[in-house]
Image (cartoon, coloured by chain):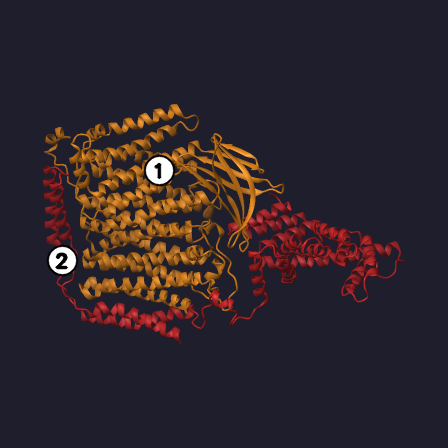
Amino acid sequence: MTLWFVFALMTVAAIFAVLWPLGRGSGAQDQGSEVAVYKDQLAEIERDLAAGLIPAPEAEAARVEISRRLLAAAASEPAMAPKSNLKWRRVAAALALAGLPLVAVAVYMPLGSPKLQDFPLAQRQRGSGMAQSLENLVVQVEQHLEKNPTDGRGWNVLAPVLERLGRFDDAVRAYRNSLTYNGESAERRSDLGEAISAAAGGVVTAEAKTEFERAHALNADDPKANYFLGLAAEQDGRKGDAATMWRALLAKAPADAPWRALVQSSLARVGGGTMPALSDETIAASKDIAEGDRNAMVRGMVDRLATRLKQNGDDVEGWLRLVRAYLVMGERDKAMGASADARQAVAGDAERLRQLNEGLRTLGVDG
Amino acid sequence: MIAESGHYALVLALGLALIQSTVPLIGARLGDVALMNVARSTALAQLLFVGASFVALVMLHVNSDFSVANVYENSHSMKPLLYKITGVWGNHEGSMLLWVSILALFGGLVASFGNNLPLSLRAHVLAVQAWIASAFYLFILVTSNPFLRIANPPIEGRDLNPVLQDIGLAVHPPMLYLGYVGFSISFSFAIAALMEGRIDAAWARWVRPWTLVAWIFLTLGIAMGSYWAYYELGWGGWWFWDPVENASLMPWLAGTALLHSALVMEKRNALKVWTILLSILTFSLSLLGTFLVRSGVITSVHAFATDPTRGVFILLILCLFIGGSLALFAGRATSLKQGGLFAPISREGALVLNNLLLTVACAVVLFGTLYPLAMEMLADFKMSVGAPFYNLTFAPLFAMLLLAVPFGPMLAWKRGDLLGVTQRLLAAGVAGLVVIAITWAWVRGGSALAPLAIGLGVFVIAGAVTDIVERTGLVRLPFATVLHRARGLPRSAWGTAFAHAGLGVALIGIVCETTWNSEYIATMKPNDIAHVAGYDLKLDGLLQRQGPNYREMIAEFKISRDGEALTVMAPSKRSFTTRGSSTTEAALLTRGASQLYVSLGDATAEGAIAVRIYYKPMVLLIWWGPVLMAFGGVLSLSDRRLRVGAPKPARAKQRLQPAE
């Protein structure tokens, strides 16, 4: 309500600005004229002459010239008897009274959001009115960590949340910070490895594998490290090694471990689930199938990413992830194609283009 | 409430501008004083409402109200207060709001201080201002509205482009806009004169202060922008012949020409039609600059966002105003009375030469700016026109101009005596030659043209001094008389001398910097020592620090010269998390007019860091020159007296000769 009152006051002030001169009589107005300028110029010459700035003959010549202009100006000066045209003044007044508010409302209504309150920072921090969504909480924690980057506990809390929100690259950074400030532990290493492979679209990259190996070195029984090392072996095509690792993992696992089912299904995928007594032929066949399945899964993920980027090309991280995935899958042509597309998509934004180029360089796709 | 009130105020300003663009014109046609006076009150009210709108946006940025899309996209709650304020115009929408605010400011100034104008002229001028304003209000409201809201406001903003988080943003854009937009006044005056069909010396007298104000701000704005690029981008370059820079240089060249031709018009009632055309061209070039920068045709730090509808809209405004005004000019110019006559060798003649050279230089820059764009658009062929092109075209033109500069103010009006002036400039010429000889003997390396150019700079400065000496009679009259005459000398004469000397100063700086700068690029480890131009820079160590919204890595260098420790320089690299980008903060050490410049590259894993070190001799002269020019402009502006160009009478020539 107050807002409409303010709008009304402002409109009245604007209308008043138009009506005010209309209401005043058109008496003798204070105004400049050409004649006045030339008269001032003549006076100026006298002053310059007195100060000795111009010699007398030049002053005389200037005086003659200006006087000539003065006469011409006086002759051509329109005889401006102040006229008043009541009809047009009424039109102008009507324009101000009706036209101004009409234009204002017609332009403002489709553009403005009069129902929306202001939302300054101070009010927001009191937390009133706004649901504390997960994203907002994350932002608050991030702000806190920006100021206190050595708060290891904060990074510990933040990292899994970021991973769940799909911000894998941020999660990787958070896990790294957590490692730096909380110290080494097998769990943190393998969490970091998991985030890295999540960022790579599910592929256990060499970087991720290093992390899992470190975790394994710290604690040979760390289930996550063991599982992912198996996955890495599977992705490298060493099915047998993968099966061995997973079987060992299941043997040591407590009966109620929540990840049992996952490992079992993985084991089944590489064909080490039930019986070892299969002919070489069958093993070879199932290997092919499993290979096909895995490829189909990864490919599906990559395709989805590619489609998303086609619709919204702003996401530099996404492009890098796509290029990396193609590289991991050994499809260098597609990787090159994707990096060309990416360059085109972000060409309008110098900053993004720079980030992209840097990322591509670290991936080893041209320089 | 603040957001919506600001939005509504902008809409009301549009309404007022529409009234201001029509009612006063009707009043002028009918001779109705009241209707003409509507221009004045609406211009002031417009200023009030646009000002309120601008203040509202500033408050929203300061309060970090992320329910406003513009604030969300360009601000961050942890940004320092100064950058929260300057961030208002560090983005497309806000900078357009600043543009119209300044337009309204100039309109308001004409309305409140235009008492010495004839009523109908003032009505016309303000109406034309309102046309421009209406077009830009519409542009802002329709395509670049800074007051659009977000229903579910995010908790944190996206932060301002880190490169712009600098004190330079507080100064450079407002100054540049004051210059760009200031030329709208002379444009409006020119259109008003064409519409009224009357133009005379009095017109030039009324336009002069506005042109001068715009020129002063544009000069400072360009210089400031150049210095900002120099210290912020980390490459030590101060002018790149980038289209965006050219976009500001073109109105400056045309505006400088306008300043001089308006002088001829005021003093001698000549060059009237040309002056009108220059007024139109200068503002057209300002609009073109706005188009180039704001439409996203050019990718640069200035193009905040690219949006084709904006480009089309500005192009439309551009065509409407430039096309319309030139058509009006073509139709009405012939009906304007021609002014006084003058001999080719005279002050007027010199100013015509000045105009000729400046406009040709401007045309060269225009060609160099638009040709690559046209090629890219029509032939899909990317090319860049850079320093080599301008060195071959722009530089010789300017050299000619500078050679002529000292002669101009010493020639008499109407008919001059070139030989006499040459004799009087002999001392200045000798000074230039001596400097050439000394430079040649003293320095090693560099272009053979450099000493010549320095000599030219000295000649320009000495010429400006000679002019003052001549006018006060310093050498031939007793000191008391000299003092009296110096005090009586119009401040505009002092202004001329300062502005012309500023040209020479800037030239010397440019030549020294480009010819004799030395650079050292290397990867340094702590305790490494770099030797550049006689200075020893020892990298002490790298340290990390947390800023308000960034983290920075600082490298500390101990500087010494000949074993004597001077100071510590600390360039840094800042990384901003929100935008995920980083900036380099160069460290500068000023010694006289020369500077030592250190900026950081990337750090390597082994604790080493890439370092760029430059020694730039006399580099500060490049910016002191424009500051001197602007100071000259201020002196001339403060001279409220009328300008009379007393002509040299033909008969009196013989008689006067011996006295000189």
Given residues A130 and A285, the one toward you in this image is A130
* Residue occupied by mark 2: A78
Expressed as whole percent of the image width and height from the top left, the position of residue B349 reads 22, 37
Q: Colour of chain A?
A: red
Identify which residue is drawn at 32% across, 57% down: B103
* Chain letter of the residue carrying label 1: B
Badge number at residue B506: 1
Q: Amino acid at mark 1?
A: Ala
Few, some or many residues within 10 Å of mark 1 (<14, 14–19, 20+): many
Q: Amino acid at mark 2?
A: Pro
* Chain letter of the residue carrying label 2: A
Q: Colour of chain B?
A: orange
Secondary structure type for disc 1 = helix
Image side of residue B564 versus residue A285, left or right: left
Quarter of the picture containing the C terminus of chain B is: top left
User: Where, by quadrant of the figure, is residue B654 drawn?
Assistant: top left
Expressed as whole percent of the image width and height from the top left, the position of residue B94 reads 41, 58
